[in-house]
Amino acid sequence: MKTYKFKINGNEYNVEINSVEGAVADVSVNGTSYKVEMETPVAPAPVIANASEGPKASPVDSSASPKNDTNAPAQGAGKAVTSPLPGVIIEVSVKEGQAVKAGQKVAVIEAMKMENEIQASTDGTVTAVLVNKGDSVLEGAEIVKIA
């Protein structure tokens, strides 16, 4: 189950997506259940069997990551922060080597004409930024890795 917080015309809504089957989503808005019919059915996220087929790391300013620090996390290691839904990345808010706190914004995705913040799930250091502004991503796509 995925949970989102929306603020529309000054009103706050807590939206939980319970399930999606084809073009019908079972959602709860502020505790009230709804069946929502979507214009386009949601395709299941593809399984990437070979890492070389996945998203590529973006170029990073070499001054952003430590060179000889033995305590620094390995590049690309760590827990992935993933996209909660398909959409287009409109902002990448972190750089490789940057320290982040749980709940801190790491990117913004536009989906269904709404902007959604993607937040760090844990405290740590960004070891890889796997998307760029303008990239289209599927639900479950890795956005950044944090160790």
Image (cartoon, grey):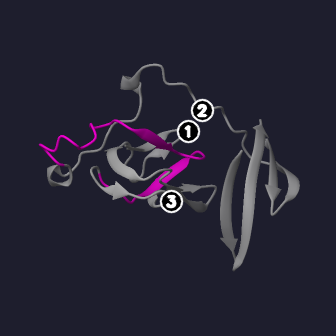
The residue indicated by pointer 2 is: 45
Using the numbered discs, state the Cα–Cα distance from disc 1 to disc 3 in whole angstroms.
Answer: 18 Å
Circles 2 and 1, Cβ within 8 Å, touching? The answer is: yes
Q: Residue at x 60, y 46 (%)?
A: 85
Single out the mark in the foreground, 1 or 3: 3
Q: Amino acid at mark 3?
A: Gly
Q: Is residue 29 magenta?
A: no
The residue indicated by pointer 3 is: 103
Q: Secondary structure at mark 1?
A: loop
Task: Decide if residue 95 is on the left or right side of residue 135.
Answer: left
Residue 16 locus on image (x, y percent): 74, 53
Q: Amino acid at mark 1?
A: Gly
Q: Residue at x 69, y 73 (%)?
A: 8
Residue 140 is marked as 1
Task: Decide if residue 72 is on the left or right side of residue 28.
Answer: left
- In the image, residue 78 sits, relative to residue 99, either above or below, namely above
